[in-house]
Image (cartoon, grey):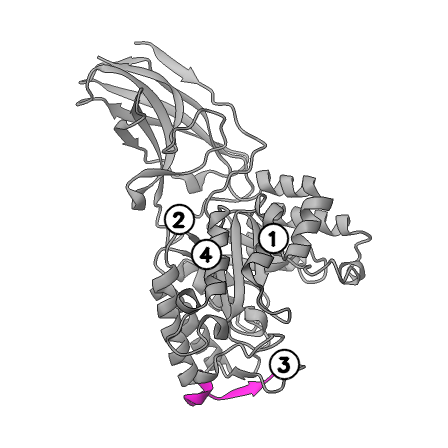
Amino acid sequence: MAYVTVYPVENKVDLIRNPCMGWVLYIDAFEGGFPEARAYWALQQNNAAKASIFYVRLPWSIVEPQEGKYAWDEDPNFKLLIQMALERGLRLAFRVYVDSRDAFIQATPQYVFDAGAEGYANHEKHSSFLTPYLYDQVFQEKLTRFIEAFARQYDDPSVVDFIDAQGLGWWGEMHNVNYLTASQRKQVFEWITNVYSSNFKRVLLGAQYGENSFELPLQDWALREKGYMIRRDSFGSPVWFIEEHKDKIRSHWPNVPVFAENCYHGFAGRPEWYQEDGFATLRDMMEKVVSDAEELHANTLDLRYPEDATLWTETAPDLVQRFAVNGGYRLALSSIEYPEEAAAGEDYLISHVWTNSGVGIIPNRLRNWDYKYKPAFALLDEATHTPVLRIIDAAEPSDWFQGRSCGYRTPVSFEGVPAGKYLLAAAIVNRDNGFKPEIGLAIDNEKTSDGWYILGRLAVR
């Protein structure tokens, strides 16, 4: 029996847009306000070609200015922003925050306070902007109803990569709510975590991890029991992201993926920020950001605002390219051995080896994905590229880390396949989408319109 061995050529240079990895563009609706859609995308047009995700961080009052009236239904500018992101091949991510600190409008809708929620002023410039007490039951009831509606709209992994699923405290980063007692902290943390995790069943959820107002055992509970991934800011900072902080993140690798955020933003107009932290040049700061992301196995990193993103893409294109090909996961079939000819009623083995050249991991083991991605092989009709046989493999892609090769021997039978000559192809398919190919591979083989990578020919007799 003759077997064929194929060694696909690894693609080491092209941007591969896969779910939950890559460079991220931001709308960060704080003091600068909320941008007009066409003006924003005019500024980000070139930068979007390097990115994979469009992340919208905005106050609750923008997405639900009146009770039951949602921006995704009612606000033409919001809808256009999202539409134009999707038209550019970007997937979505969101953080909705409730704290008015530094916001350009009151972050929690006024209707919440009109219904009886208690609040306080903590905006340095706008004392009329209220922030709710997090333990307030009216506030919790109203935010719960919003999150339920939010999930009905955006619990859709075909367009949304992740939700920052807490959003409390200053800037939604879970800190500076020190008025909470220990019992209140536990109640508030478990409430917000449970509300998001019980409503978002399919999209990945992020926990702002590290030094904030909530104890690490609570944060670890969200990762361990509720399937959250780590969202962490301050990448690149020698002040706010020290080895002790990094060690806490390392302790969760490789079970919990890391979605990273640059410490420095708006740096086009305030270079003193990174200079005061010891960086002589913008380039020095950028290199440290990327190095931290690689060291901590980050899946994502931010180009951020239009001005910041343009500085990244125009002054450090090599660093942008470096994270584009090293960040997140980059899966490749490095070899496959299969029978050149097979009898329909006999059993055979396909031997295959997979690698991941990225520093991150495919988040397949997290609860909301539930191992939905599977490596697969197919026999394709030579003329139409339609699968006549699909072989769903038991290999687990989240076991594939940088620096290791994972080999498998898969039994296969061609019984029921009509005699003829076929193309043998490989893909990573999505169980929840009819086992269709969905994850781009870092190989140069011809790819069908349906996403199967052609490896060679196999005859069935």
CA distance for labels 4 and 1:
25 Å
Q: Which residue is mark 1?
A: 42
Q: Is residue 422 left or right of residue 178?
A: left
For marks 1 and 2, give the CA distance: 38 Å
Give the residue number, with chain letter if any, for mark 2.
365
Q: CA distance from mark 3 to mark 1?
A: 31 Å
Mark 1 closeness class: few <14, some 14–19, many ≥20 residues within 10 Å: few
The answer to whether 19 is drawn above or below residue 338 in the figure is: below
On-image quarter of the C terminus: top left
Q: Say whether disc 3 or disc 1 marks the residue closer to the N-terminus.
A: 1
- In the image, what residue type sits under mark 3? His
Which dot, 3 or 1, sits closer to the camera? 1
Question: Which class describes the residues within 10 Å of circle 2: few (<14), some (14-19), or many (20+)?
Answer: many
Mark closest to the chain's N terminus, 4 or 1: 1
Front in this rendered view, residue 406 or 17: 17
Query: Mark 3 — residue?
Result: 123
Q: Is residue 423 above or below residue 406?
A: above
- The spot of residue 425 in percent (x, y) is 36, 25
What number is the disc on residue 1? Answer: none
